[in-house]
Image: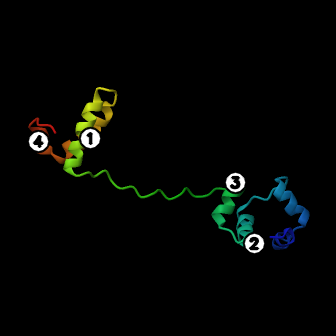
Amino acid sequence: MSVRKVAAHFDVSTQSVYGWEAGGADFVDDNRATGLATVLEMDLLEVRRGLGLWVPPPEPEETLPFNPTDDELDEMIAEARKDRDRGNPELYDALMSVWRLRHPEQHETGETA
């Protein structure tokens, strides 16, 4: 991409473009970012990010809910029970909470996994 082409697109001198490149002049605004993306044939968000302008946060990756089978849950509880006394009681408590939600009738009678 030539400096002249960028300068012509924005109707400024080539010296202004060199100043923008060096960070010595105010370039940053929404309209110029859009124009720069167009003239450089780049993604607008990539240009905005490079200029330090606001960009929307990335879409969160889809996460699957914690939904193990009953057998998998029982196995995880057994492993967590071993680790409970070695400093990770929170994991055991969290897994037991999931188990209790799945088996409310057994929880009410005092039975555990």
Please, what secondary structure does the residue beneath circle 4 have? helix
Residues at marks 3 and 1 touching, judged by CB atoms closer than 8 Å: no
Q: Residue at x 50, y 59 (%)?
A: 59
Instruction: Report the residue marked by disc 3.
Output: 52
Please, what secondary structure does the residue beneath circle 3 have? loop
Q: Quadrant of the N terminus?
A: bottom right
Instruction: Report the residue marked by disc 2.
Output: 39
Ranked by sequence position, the earlier of labels 3 and 4 is: 3
Instruction: Report the residue marked by disc 1.
Output: 95
Whole-angstrom CA distance, mark 1 to mark 4, is: 15 Å
73 relative to 105 in the view: left or right: right
Q: Which of the two residues, 28 or 109, is positioned nearer the viewer here?
A: 109
104 relative to 19 in the view: left or right: left
Q: Residue at x 28, y 26 (%)?
A: 85
Hey, which quadrant is residue 110 in on the image?
top left
Q: Amino acid at mark 1?
A: Leu
User: Badge 4: few (under 14), some or many (20 or more) residues near its Cα, within 10 Å?
Assistant: few
Ranked by sequence position, the earlier of labels 3 and 2 is: 2
Q: Amino acid at mark 2?
A: Val
The spot of residue 33 in percent (x, y) is 72, 64
Ranked by sequence position, the earlier of labels 3 and 1 is: 3
Q: Amino acid at mark 3?
A: Gly
Instruction: Report the residue marked by disc 4.
Output: 106
